Image (tube, rainbow, N blue to C red):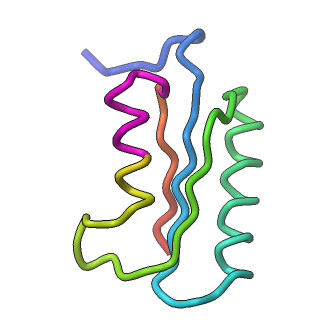
Amino acid sequence: MKNRIKKQDNRAWIYCRVAHLDDMALMFQQEQMVEYARKQGWEVVGITAEQGSGLDFNRKGLKEVMEAIEAERVDIVLAKSV
């Protein structure tokens, strides 16, 4: 049985990250994901944007997303692979 998103489970958190200092790329990523969430009918309840290496998971922004998930404040996490 496939795992389906229920209509009421539409709280989305957006996670954006770029490896190098590039405010424009980060902003573009965020705008794309906000638009995608809007088209899906999802409510964006949080956005985390950070700049830094993706070699490990020890990042402040990623911890913020994980805390939101663990506190059940979010149903969907959007992240973009560039």
Q: Position of residue 14 (x, y in %)?
A: 57, 48
Report x, y in % for residue 82: 50, 75
> Is residue 39 left or right of 69 when viewed as pictured?
right
Q: Quadrant of residue 60?
A: bottom left
Q: Looking at the picture, tell me which residue is in the foreground, 5 or 73.
A: 73
- Relative vertical location of residue 71 with respect to residue 39 in this rendering, above or below: above
What residue sits 58% from the left and 63% below the top? 49
Q: Is the residue 44 above or below the residue 9 in the image?
A: below
Give the number of callouts.
Answer: 0
Please determine whether, in this image, residue 54 is positioned above or below residue 43. Answer: below
**Residue found farthest to the front:** 60
Using residue 82 as the reference point, say whether residue 40 is left or right of it. Answer: right
Q: Position of residue 21 (x, y in %)?
A: 58, 89
Residue drawn where x is 22% and y is 72% of the image = 56
Q: Main secondary structure of the magenta part?
A: helix
* Residue range of the region highlighted in magenta in the rendering: 65-74
